[in-house]
């Protein structure tokens, strides 16, 4: 069984599973957004951070990477992803079609935000920057998550204007 995972945030630079193939891909109907409060990995219950999530929006699309799991590692990878991504049930695991840059469409494991979950939020970019600059969680500073994600998107030619603005603003706040 071939297993694909769609990476749009930390899975781009820290997948934590063996990858057989990586290709730029597009997921239609969702936008990448700092719309999830992080109370574990990049913040705490006392001082929540923000992490990226896929927010359902009819005319939106998100470019990221389709990551094909090394054959023989599908079960352990899915279990590890569930432990990592479903820690607070704010993400919902879906199997959705993503379009590879080659034009091929593959079905991939995708983690999207539950818009009814208490951790779901919509904040202006300045408020996002203030939160990201100050929050720290079990996996480190929230700013590190932003910088790594934005930097990796830039490296693979998928710059995200909101993440670029946030990176510059958070660097200003931290200096």
Image (cartoon, rainbow, N blue to C red):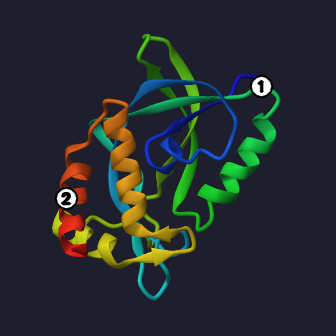
To which quarter of the image does residue 141 belong?
A: bottom left
Q: Which residue is mark 2?
A: 168
Q: CA distance from mark 2 to mark 1?
A: 40 Å
Q: What percent of the width, then of the height, locates residue 41?
A: 54, 68
**Which secondary structure, mark 1?**
loop
Instruction: Mark 1: give few (<14), some (14-19) or many (20+) Cα within 10 Å.
Output: few
Residue 168 position (above or below residue 154): below
Q: Nearer the viewer, mark 2 or mark 1?
A: 2
Residue 85 position (above or below residue 28): below
Q: What percent of the width, then of the height, locates residue 57?
A: 30, 43
Q: Earlier in the sequence, mark 2 or mark 1?
A: 1
Q: Which residue is mark 1?
A: 71
To which quarter of the image does residue 173 belong?
A: bottom left
The residue shown at (35%, 46%) is 151
Q: What percent of the width, then of the height, locates residue 14?
A: 56, 48
- Answer left or right for 117 relative to 56: right
Contact between labelled residues 1 and 2, with CB atoms less than 8 Å apart: no
Instruction: Mark 2: give few (<14), some (14-19) or many (20+) Cα within 10 Å.
Output: few
Q: Is residue 36 visible?
A: no
Q: Quadrant of the N terminus?
A: top right
């Amino acid at each position: 069984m071939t297993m694909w995972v769609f990476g749009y945030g930390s899975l781009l630079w820290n997948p934590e599973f063996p990858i057989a193939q990586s290709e730029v891909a597009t997921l239609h109907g969702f936008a990448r957004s700092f719309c999830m409060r992080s109370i574990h990995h990049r913040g705490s219950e006392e001082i929540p951070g923000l992490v990226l999530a896929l927010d359902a929006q009819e005319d939106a699309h998100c470019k990221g990477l389709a990551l094909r799991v090394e054959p023989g590692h599908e079960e352990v990878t899915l279990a590890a992803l569930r432990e990592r991504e479903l820690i607070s049930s704010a993400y919902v695991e879906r199997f959705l079609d993503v379009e590879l840059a080659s034009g091929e469409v593959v079905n991939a494991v995708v983690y999207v935000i539950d818009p009814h979950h208490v951790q779901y939020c919509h904040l202006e970019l300045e408020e996002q920057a203030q939160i990201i600059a100050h929050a720290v969680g079990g996996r480190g500073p929230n700013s590190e998550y932003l910088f790594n994600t934005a930097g990796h998107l830039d490296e693979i030619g998928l710059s995200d204007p909101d993440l670029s603005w946030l990176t510059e603003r958070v660097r200003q706040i931290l200096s």
